Image (tube, helix red, strand yellow):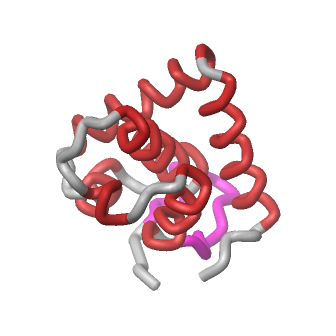
Amino acid sequence: MEKHNINYWIYPGLTYNIYDTKTAMKAVTQIFNVTAEELMSKSRKRYITEARFAYCYITRKKLYYTLDVIGKSINRHHATVIHNVNMAKILGEQNTTIKHKIDILNANINKRKIER
């Protein structure tokens, strides 16, 4: 498991994150039916980019990883991760299918159901 330095003063009450980026990627690939290689690829196909948006959103907003760590895990720049997080929010408001899949990811993380 990757160990990252998280500033506990910025996020009071934050406990150590038991999920690493690979575990989150595995959950996204299962729910969005894509492979990890597709998620890290340069492809701009819609179903792959939607999965990438969800991955960035979950790892940033739910698991509190830094933009740099998320970007390195999918071979992207940190600015692209910011864009992906924002797009996940927008698509979640407009597309009920994506919102439902992101809600499933949130529920799995809350219940700690992601298999390692």
Q: Is residue 10 left or right of residue 92?
A: left
Numbered label tally: 0
Q: Nearer the viewer, residue 30 or 109?
A: 30
**Above or below, comparing residue 102 to residue 7 in the picture:** above
Q: Residue at x 32, y 48 (%)?
A: 67
**Which quadrant would residue 95 be assigned to in this image?**
top right
Q: Residue at x 59, y 14 (%)?
A: 94
Q: Position of residue 66 (x, y in %)?
A: 37, 53
Per the picture, the main secondary structure of the magenta-coloured stretch is loop
Q: Is residue 74 visible?
A: yes
Q: Is residue 103 left or right of residue 43?
A: right
Q: Position of residue 8 (x, y in %)?
A: 54, 61
Q: Nearer the viewer, residue 9 or 41?
A: 41
Q: Nearer the viewer, residue 9 or 78?
A: 78
Q: Is residue 29 left or right of residue 94?
A: left
Is 23 part of what is drawn in magenta?
no
Q: Position of residue 102 (x, y in %)?
A: 64, 41
**Above or below, comparing residue 44 to residue 20 in the picture:** above
Q: Position of residue 43 (x, y in %)?
A: 22, 44
Quarter of the image with the C terminus in it: bottom right
**Above or below, comparing residue 95 to residue 47 in the picture:** above
Q: Residue at x 44, y 72 (%)?
A: 22
Q: Which residues are magenta?
A: 6-19
Q: Is residue 9 visible?
A: no
Is 14 part of what is drawn in magenta?
yes
Q: Residue at x 34, y 55 (%)?
A: 39
Q: Residue furthest right?
A: 111
**Above or below, comparing residue 60 to residue 26 in the picture:** above
